[in-house]
Image (tube, rainbow, N blue to C red):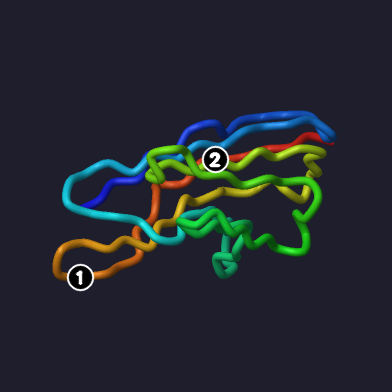
Amino acid sequence: QVQLVESGGGLVRAGGSLRLSCAASGTGFSINTMGWYRQAPGKERELVAVITSGGIPTYADSVKGRFTISRGNAKNTVYLQMDSLKPEDSIVYYCYADVYARYSRYDQWGQGTQVTVSS
């Protein structure tokens, strides 16, 4: 089973920046799309940004122009540079990976990292 380990969340003032990182570990797998979702209590998880193995990104309208997603050279890491943060960006962010294993394909999620933006 692939494990996703996130880092980089925390507290920042409005207008500030944070960079989230996520690294996949395990053996015998490859990852197609990788990215970030976020979820507020009692609400469905929503897409923030994802990027394919070929480097094609997709962003939620609410973060376009402020957030930038990128993949590491090894393709098993993904980063989310968050600039011009707003209080409404305060939420738990989850790393996501579309995993191809030897006999299966599945969605893998990280444990979540809290981002808090103070006004």
Q: Position of residue 14 (x, y in %)?
A: 83, 35
SS assignment at label 1: loop
Classed neighbour count for the residue bearing mark 1: other residues with Cα under 10 Å, few (<14), some (14–19), many (≥20): few
Q: Position of residue 15 (x, y in %)?
A: 84, 34
Q: Is residue 50 visible?
A: yes
Front residue of 22 and 112: 22
**102 left or right of 35 in image:** left
**Precedes in sequence: disc 2 or disc 1:** 2
Q: Is residue 40 visible?
A: no
Above or below: residue 64 compared with residue 70:
below
SS assignment at label 2: strand
**Which residue matches tag 1?**
104
Front residue of 107 and 41: 107
- All told, the count of numbered labels is 2
Name the residue at 44% across, 38% down. Answer: 73
Q: Position of residue 70 (x, y in %)?
A: 57, 44
What distance separates the C-alpha of mark 2 from that of mark 1? Answer: 25 Å
Q: Amino acid at mark 1?
A: Ser
Name the residue at 72% across, 48% down. Answer: 89
**7 left or right of 41 in image:** left
Q: Residue furthest front?
A: 54
**Which residue matches tag 2?**
79
